[in-house]
Image (cartoon, rainbow, N blue to C red):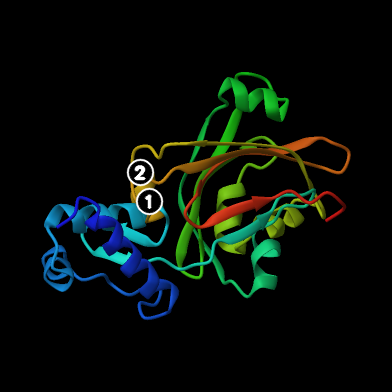
Amino acid sequence: MTRERWREIRALIEQDIMDGVMEPGTKLPTEPELVNLYGAGRHSVRRAVTELAKAGYLSVEQGRGTFVQARPMIDYAIGKRTRLRRNLDPKGIEVTGETLGFDRIPAPRRVAELLRIAPDAEVIATRRRSLADGLPVNIGTIYHDATRFPDFAERRAAMGSTTSVYRSYGIDDYLRGGTQIHARPAQGDEPQRLHQHPDMPVMVVRAVDTLLDGTPIATSKVIWSAARVKFTVPTGED
């Protein structure tokens, strides 16, 4: 048994995934079953599965098992009018979401600066998770001035989209005023909420949305799964 046996097992499983033998959503055999199947040691099997999960081929779900991940990755365009459904609907990807909670809190300093409100002003912090074809793609928090949008969270839950909520406040159009992206290791319960391996990094996207005249209306911090999403920045009008 060579020390690189795990690479052979990884290649065999990856090939089955790419050939469609193991379709997205298929549960991987247990570790003892894989040991018998490939005639390898537990360490080699465990290393192969871990590396496939890091690469985004497998999703490790605590308490449920390891599943074949849906591929290919989603190409998400960040432009002047960045909208989740606008990005994914044309690709035939079903977008769903869920509110994880919301709070009325004093604005953190950074949030107050970005929204151009007083440091002691209150904001509505809405925490959400978005899914594409049933798989989590991001979790994050969006902040709104509580004076201007006092019941944003309730309207968002009732209307189903941020764009619809803005229209209910008389805002027919809005733009992406700025976007910052950086990668980092996943933290806390992020891997569990995103259904990805703990060693798979995440992408942190901080953004500000504005009215057409540049007045900020929201700022957000969203954690995206690096296993499922890649970003494209268009060079022209979107």
Q: Nearer the viewer, residue 65 or 15?
A: 15
Q: Nearer the viewer, residue 9 or 220?
A: 9
Q: Which residue is mark 1?
A: 54
Q: Is residue 60 above or below residue 147?
A: below
Q: Is residue 92 above or below residue 171?
A: below
**Where's residue 228, x and y in %?**
50, 57
Q: Is residue 62 visible?
A: no
Number of residue marks: 2
Q: Looking at the picture, which amino acid does disc 1 mark?
A: Lys
Q: Is residue 180 above or below residue 70?
A: above
Q: Residues within 10 Å of mark 1 (few under 14, many from 20)?
A: many
Say which residue appears at 66% left-offset and 72% top-offset.
Answer: 91
For the N terminus, the quadrant is bottom left
Q: Which residue is mark 2?
A: 199
Name the image quarter holding residue 49.
bottom left
Q: Looking at the picture, which amino acid does disc 2 mark?
A: Asp
Q: Is residue 122 visible?
A: yes
Left or right relative to 127: residue 199: left
Q: Secondary structure at mark 2?
A: loop
Say which residue appears at 55% left-offset and 24% top-offset.
Answer: 108
As measured in the structure, the alpha-carbon distance from the residue carrying label 2 to the one carrying label 1 is 6 Å
**Where's residue 39, x and y in %?**
13, 68
Task: Give yes or no for contact between labels 2 and 1 (Cβ–Cβ under 8 Å).
Answer: yes
Say which residue appears at 29% left-offset and 52% top-offset.
Answer: 50
Q: Nearer the viewer, residue 89 or 119?
A: 89
